[in-house]
Image: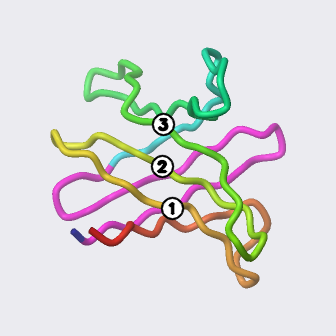
Amino acid sequence: MAIDGKITRTDDDAITGWIASLTFDVDITLTKNPHKTKETHPDFEITTRTPRNRIIRIGSAWEQTSQAGNDYLSLSVMVNGQQVRVNALRTEEDPEGEYRLVPLAA
């Protein structure tokens, strides 16, 4: 599945962005998970707005560190009835706080 997207961490530590494919295109917001009580629980809840402007949770995200020591986010999002897994990565060329979404290989 072809997926693209970008998220940006703002000065107030909010994270907003978008995720899209040929069948969906949604703006997303990541907020700290207020229910996290264990290390394995998600660090963030991912929400979007419905066509009637209601906020709904569509996924979760975890803060991760690669073997090379690079920080990234691992996202799991439910769209169109299917789970989509992507990583949010930063390269040296990306502006500070900006991450591009890269789908995981199936």
Q: Which amino acid does label 3 sit on?
A: Ser
- In the rendered image, the quadrant that contains the N terminus is bottom left
Rendered position, 46 above or below 106: above
Residue stretch in magenta: 2-25
Tell me, yes or no, whether the two marked residues, 2 and 3, touch with CB atoms within 8 Å: yes
Left or right, residue 33 beside residue 57: right
Tell me, yes or no, whether the two marked residues, 1 and 2, touch with CB atoms within 8 Å: yes
Which mark is first along the chain, 3 or 2? 3
Q: Residue 87 carries which label?
A: 1
Which mark is first along the chain, 2 or 1? 2
Marks 2 and 3, Cα distance to the nearest angstrom? 6 Å
Residue topped by disc 3? 60
Rendered position, 69 above or below 74: below
Residue closest to the eye, 36 or 93 = 36
Residue 86 picture location, percent across and down: 43, 59
- Please tell me which residue is depicted at 48% across the width and 35% down the height of the picture: 46
Residue 18 picture location, percent across and down: 45, 52
Marks 3 and 1, Cα distance to the nearest angstrom? 12 Å
Marks 1 and 2, Cα distance to the nearest angstrom? 6 Å
- In the rendered image, the quadrant that contains the C terminus is bottom left
Residue closest to the eye, 90 or 67 = 67
Q: Which amino acid does label 1 sit on?
A: Asn
Number of marks in picture:
3
- Please tell me which residue is depicted at 65% across the width and 24% down the height of the picture: 38
Residue topped by disc 2? 75
How would you rate the neighbour count of disc 3 (Cα within 10 Å): few for under 14, some for 14-19, many for 20 or more? many
Q: What element carries label 1?
A: strand
